[in-house]
Structure formats: C-alpha cells, structure tokens
Image (spheres, helix red, strand yellow):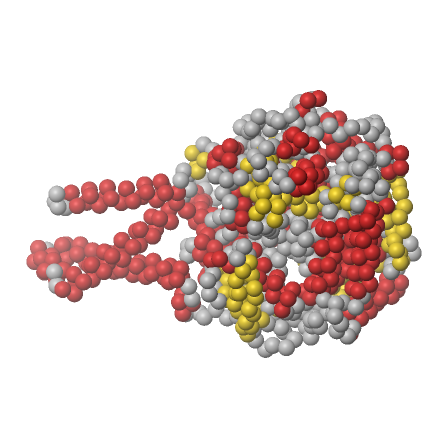
Amino acid sequence: MKERTVQLEVLRYNPDTDSEPHFQRYEVVCQDEWVVLDALNEVKETLDPTLNYRWSCHMAVCGSCGMMINGEPKLACHTFLRDYPGVIRVEPLAHFPIERDLVTTPDDFMEKLKRVKPYLIPKKPKPLEAGEYRQTPAQLTKFRQYSMCINCMLCYAACPEYGLSPHFIGPAAITLAHRYNQDSRDGGRDERQEVIATQEGVWECTFVGACSEVCPGHVDPASALQQVKILSCFDWIGEHLLPGGKK
Amino acid sequence: MDTITTDVAIIGAGGAGLRAAIALAQSDPDLRIALISKVYPMRSHTCAAEGGAAGVIKPDDSFELHFNDTVGGGDWLSDQDCVELFVREAPRELLQLEHWGCPWNREADGSVAVRPFGGMKKQRTWFAADKSGFHILHTLFQTSLQFESIRRFDEYFALDLLVAEGRCQGLTAIEMRSGQLRQFHAKAVIIAGGGAGRMFPFTTNGAIKTGDGMAMAYRAGVPLKDMEFIQYHPTGLPNTGSLLTEACRGEGGILVNKHGRRYLQDYGMGPETPVGQPQLKTMELGPRDRLSQAYWHELQKGNTVTTPWGECVLLDMRHLGAKKIAERLPLVHELAESYLGVDIVKDPVPIRPVVHYMMGGISTDTNAATQLPGLYAAGECACVSLNGANRLGSNSLVELLVFGRRAAESALAHARQQPEPATAALAEQAERSQARIRELFSQPDGNESVAGLRKEMMQTMEKNVGIYRTAEGLEEGVDKIRELRERYRAVTLTDKTNVYNTDLFQVLELGSMLDCAEAVTVGALARKESRGAHQRLDHTERDDANYLRHTLVYSQGREAPRVDYLDVVITKSPPGVRDYSGDHK
Amino acid sequence: MSRRPYVREVPPTAWYFRHPRYLRYMAREVTSIFVGAYCVLLTVGVLRLAQGQASYEAFLQALQSPASIVFQLLAFAAASYHAVTWFTATQKAMPLQLGDEFVPGGWIAGAHFVGWGLLSAAILYFAGVF
C-alpha cells in the first residue's frame, strides 16, 4: 500500500455566506488504492468538517455519491485515485441546482421518475393464490439490463439536451418506462407512451449518447431511448397509415 | 415549528418502511401516510443485499424444514411462534414482489428459480442475480409511486419520538435541506430505520447504518433486545469491507488457508465435499457465525495469508468458470476487480469476516408491536426474535417484507382506535427536541471531535466486542463506551449553519451509535455463555439453564442501563445440537 | 440562514465546447449539411438531364472545376463519417435477441458495414467502374 498526497479542488457553496460557488483546495494524504470518496472522507475527518456531500454504500449500488470529477459525471465511490495523477477537481453534478457544496437538489428527477409510471401494470391481473406470472429467462433478458438503473443521475448530468431543455424527461426515467414496457408481465405501455413518446419525452433526445458513456451500471439508456423512438414510429404508422388504425 | 399531521408515520424508507407504506396505502386509500427518511428511498441500505430471499416454493421443500433451519441456525434463541408464522408467510410476500415486477431469476419453464444458501438444507433462496436487495428495494420504491396517499419526506432526519398519555404519537425530524425542525403528529409510528453496523470499523454496512431508529426507541424507554448478537459475514473485502455474497459459496466457491487447505473441515463442518459440488448445510455452506469463528481460529494458528490489508483467508471461485461467474456473480466479479484488483476468474480473492448484521434491535412481538403503545418496528432495527443468536443468510430480506406488512396492519388497527393526537403535550415535547439541537449549536467548542470519538468507539467495539469476547474485554468495553458517552456531551459542532449540515447529522448519528453500543456491550457482558454469534472465551458452552432467554436492555439516561430477560418461546423444537457436519446427513 | 439553491446556467450556444464527446456529436450532426448539399447537387443534375444533352454536359463540365472537386471530397468525407457513426450506433437502436441471449452489438454494426460495402460495390459495378 503506497501513500500519496492528493490535491483536491472542491467546489464549495454555502447559501448562508456565499453569493456564488468557489473552489477550495485541499491537500490530503491518501492510500494508492483509494477512491475519490475516501479522499473526501479524509478531508471531512481530518481537515474540514464543514464539507458536505452525500454517500452511503461505497460499492456503487446506492447511487448517492454522483459528482463531477474533472468535468466528468462519476460515482465518487467508484473513481480511483490511481487514474488521476494530477489535481482532482470535484464539483456537484451538472444540470442540478446546488443546495450546498457537493449536494444538489434532485427534485426534478424525482418528479420525472414518478411521471413515467415505473411500476407493473399487469396485462392480465391474477391473484397471488394462482402463483407467479410465468416469465422465461429469455423474456427476463429482454428487459433486465434496463432494470439495473441505480438512479444516480449521472446520465442527466452528462446529457446536453437536459442541460439546455430542463423539461426533457431524460435518460433514466424514460429507460425505466421502457423497462416496464418490455416486461412480458406488463400491459401498461399505452399509458406510459402518452408520457414518454412526446416532445418533452423521447423526441427531445438527439442521440448524443453521453448517457450511456457515463452510466456506471452499464444500463445503456441511449439504447433504450432509441428503441422507444423506433417503437413509437411503428405505433404512428399503425395508427395513421394502416387500415383499421385508431385514427 | 411546522406541524405535519398524519395517521401513520414511518421512519425509514428501505425495504421494511416501503413495504409498510404500501400495505397501509392499499388497505385504506384515505389514510394519511408520512414516509420519513434521512435518504432518498433508493439510497437505503436494502439495495446492498446481494444473495437473495428465502421462501419455500419447491415441491421437495416444506415449512417444517425452513423452520428447522432457522431455529437451529439461530442456536435456539429464536421465538418459535415467530419463526412458524414467518416461514408460512414468506412465500406469499416473495410472490407479491413478483407480481409487482421484481425481476427474479427464472427456470427454463418460466417459474421462479432458487439457489442454495448457507445453513439452509434445501434450495429455497429466490434471487435476482447477485443484486437481490437492490431489485427488491427498487421494485418496492417504484410500486409505492402509484399511491398518492404515501407522502414522502425524503432527507428528513428523525430526531425524537413524541410520547403523550402513554402512547407514541409522533416524532420530530429535521428537514435536512433547510435545517428546520418539524413535528409530525401521528396516531401510530413505525420505525424501520435499519441497523447500526457503523459502530464497527470493518463493516459491509453503508454510512447511513447508524442505528438512529433503535436509539430513538431506546431513549423513549423501549428496551433493545439481544443486542449482543452481531453477525460477522465471513466473506468481506479486507480493504473496503464490501460484501462478497454468500452466493459465492452457494455457487461452489471454496475457502482455503495459506496452505491451500479447506480449513472448515477442521471446525466441525467436514468432511470435505468435492470442489465445485457444494452440499447444503456443510463445509462452505455452513452458517455465518461458524465460518467467521473458523477464521479467528485460523488466525490464531498462523494459517492466514498476510496481505497489504491485513490477515486474510482465500475465497477461490476459479473453478466456476468465466461464464457462470458472469451469469450468477457479476457484481462480485466487478467488486473484487475494481477495489482489490483481483480477477476472480483467474485468482482466489483474499477475504476476512466483516460486521454485517445485527440480530438484536427494538424489542417487538410477532405483530411488530413494541412495549410502547402506538410504536411499531420492523426490519433490522427491530428484534422480533426471528433470527435468534445468528441469522441465516436470505432470511432478512423476507423479514423486511413479512414484518413490514405486519407492522402496517398493527399500526392501522391501532390508529383506527385513536382520537386525534394530543397536540399541546406533543408541541411541548417537540420544543424539548428543538432545545437539544439549539444547545448543540450554542455549546462552546471543546476538544472532542466527532471523528475522534467515532474512531475510539469503533476501536472499542472491534477490540472488545468482536468475534470472540471475554469478561475483561467486555468490562473494558462497557467502561469505555460509558466514558465516550460522557465525553460526547461536550462534542464540538464545527459547522453552525442550517442548510444540509452533515456535520450536525454526523454528531447526531454518533449519538445514536453510542446509544446502541451501550446496549451491545452491556448485553454482551451480562450473557455468560456462548451462543451463535456471541462467543465468549471464558464461557465456551451454551447455557440453556440460565440463558435460553432474550436480553432486554433499558436505557436509564446517563446512568448504567437496566438489564432484564424474557423467556424464549419454544413451541416444537427443544434446544438441540447445531450440526453442520456432512457425516450425519 | 435558509435555502438558496444555486443554478448554474448552461451556455445556450457554445455548450458543445465543454466536452470532447459533445464536439464529436456536433461533428456528426454537421456532416448532415454536406450530405444534404450533395443531395441538392444530385437533384440539380437530374434537372439538367431533363433539360437536354447540352445542359447536362455543361453540368458535368462544372463538376470538374477545382471548387466542385473540393466540395465533393468534403462531402464524401462527411458522408463517410456520418455513415460510420450511425452504423456504429445501430447496435443500440436495434438490439437483436435470439433465444436467451442478445446478438453481440458488433455483429449488428458489422452487418450494416457489410451491407454498405456490398451496395457501394453494386453501384460502382453498374456505373461501369469494374
């Protein structure tokens, strides 16, 4: 285990005392195998108890510690110091209001998550007594990847569309809608399409692909969104161009 | 101070809290439900559970067998009426999750798949790859979003219970983003705030696991039960404490010492089973307490491997092959690779036991009711006496569901009989809660730092209340924790601002952990026997004559706590020998 | 002494200079201008053909001017970049599941490249190149 002095440049903001955020530099002795979160914890324990950030699991599954590290959205618990030889610049997640220091306000994301109806709306409801809905491994594989989202919001921080048009429902929420749409047990696609196959839904996406590049869970939201686009095109053709369509 | 009036207030939005909230919303759409948590629900530590959830579903299995495994695994300290109803209700809860969309792994015919797990005689662990807890939590959270009556208070730090007329009628909580204290008036309160593994330096528990719910109840006069039983998970990463799921061994991983010997056979868990063909309830599939204790003995014998992160044994999964590892243990593969630099497909991974789970907690009956009317508890923060002296892996995820729902049912029945809360008396108590915080802010800076006290607490717990305990060590532990509790009264709050002040929350969390630590050390010293996860070098045998009883610890404020006992409920399984040798199967 | 969340404005125009991946994206989008312009050029060619032989030959003559050649080279480069980036992206938009597993993404992108090559060869063949 080697030790190394790491230079951290952290964006600080305290609404009580600051009119706008500013950078503060810390020098902290770290173990070679540490992640950025460990360095922040070391700062808080030994140098500055007033530094604020969220964290919990330290294993990239709770999604608390998303932040910008050298300009890239990252989970601090999964960003290794060994990959950063120089000064490490830590900022709160982009595209979200800063509450304090590295703590952002996720209200907008939470509202959007709820709006896409991310729960099973059974195709054919059946009582518990009748046992489980049958689902083959292939049917599970179809949506499993999209169920792995930890809601860390890195994709929102990476998505330039969301930055420019905050009404965009965004990668993670639409992906979650797609996850339920693809579930063989679900029959709620029509309801969700009304929310996501819209201007502020999937048609706001121009396929920059940044969401998938930064996703720590390899969920690949960009893939989900493009599929939603293609499927809703088929819907439109079915409704408008084929005989017997809805309109 | 703003007041929020509700019918049922739930503290904690992890598995148990969410399950309770959904049960309440479903049983009465007009019910007002306040779901209060210091983190957003999907950050709750349920998400870190990996292996799975036990429920009898296959034809060769039975409630009887699940009962026997649980009671034996718990070294006969489980209340058997509790275990009986638990095993009966478990499959229905797991099925309910399936109906809500949980992506359980499947058999080829589309039915739910199960996997083997430590201490279980049959395959009965439902799983969603190695992210079972994550999927359970997210399924519950997402399902909860359809109920308008569940009003969430995300990032509210619960502080004190409000008790009037002998009933729990609410709580105070700090809105973290504004720093403002709010009072919640409720006809019933459910605590689902998780365990306190963070008392220890090496733990699989996330930073939020500081026992705040346990401590709230404890301070309100409710006893904490069986707190001395702390489960070490045998396979944690030695540097971060991250959990490598029991499924590693369920799928066929083996444990070896520095000589390459599968040492478990030397500790009553042999004979050796063929590599890659794990047999239930023996060798690597023995229970967690026995495996962790075997590590300790290997350490004493000098058989461990010295690594940069301390003394370890090796978990070897190479024979599983890349495909099976990718399919069944992707998270483990990733964790070992990124945090330790070990590719489990190519190399054995060094591991050591780490603190994982607390069998003890707020004393409840099988309806999740505490001794304080109007107060209910479920999940790791509660001790309903399902897990006894040692929890079997994959029982706790189901415990969240079964007792989360039961807490909701009990709370609803209670709430329906209650008048509106006694506003004036509650407001007065809320003022006291406010004064406590104000005092912290106005206290002059001293020499006691949060980080310093916390470190001393962790070292004390590790040294004196670890895998093996002695009278001297425990006495030292009790004294040291008492000393730390006194010194904590003069702790310095460095940050005196309002908005998202994590310095303040760390001070409060340290207070919670010191409350829990008091109950753990005192309970451990009083229990002069070895049972399950509580092993004493000065009392090496189980003593059913004197200790087939639950420890109850009552807070006495600054005075030493009072210890009492409660008999274990035995219905059909008299205390016997825990047998994990393959010979007798 | 209370909340005052700070909102960082995103620059509405020059935002794509903030990250190389945004620049790559803009480059991909800009290529469509050349692709579109080349389509206009082709349409003009068809128009000239309809106007008679003299008109069409004057058009062909104009194509050989240095400015036109520079434009065509640029358009070819842009179209190639456009095609490569989009074909690489097809694996995301059109994942294919056969049985229990997804077909590897590389195969889907690869199939598009193969199709592209075959079509190009066919056109060159009919154009009499070989």
Residue A92 image position (x, y, % from top left): 55, 65
For residue B161, side relative to residue B494 (left or right): right
The N terminus of chain A lies in quadrant? bottom right
Q: Is residue B518 above or below residue B346?
A: below
The residue most toward the left is: C54
Q: Is residue B477 above or below residue C12?
A: above
Residue beneath the point at 45% across and 42% down:
A245
The residue most toward the right is: B165
Residue A65 image position (x, y, % from top left): 58, 58
Find residue B160 and report its image quarter: bottom right
B327 or A146, nearer to the observer: B327
Residue beneath the point at 66% across and 27% down:
B270
B64 or B141, nearer to the observer: B64
Task: Decide if residue B540 is in sight here.
Answer: yes
Residue B290 image position (x, y, % from top left): 70, 36
B362 or B231, nearer to the observer: B231
Residue beneath the point at 82% across and 69% down:
B435
For residue B421, side relative to residue B468 (left or right): right
Find residue B246 and report its image quarter: top right
Residue B179 image position (x, y, % from top left): 71, 68
Residue beneath the point at 48% across and 39% down:
B346
B25 or B201, nearer to the observer: B201
> How many callouts does the rendering have?
0
For residue B313, side relative to residue B366 (left or right): left
Task: Decide if residue B189 is in sight here.
Answer: no
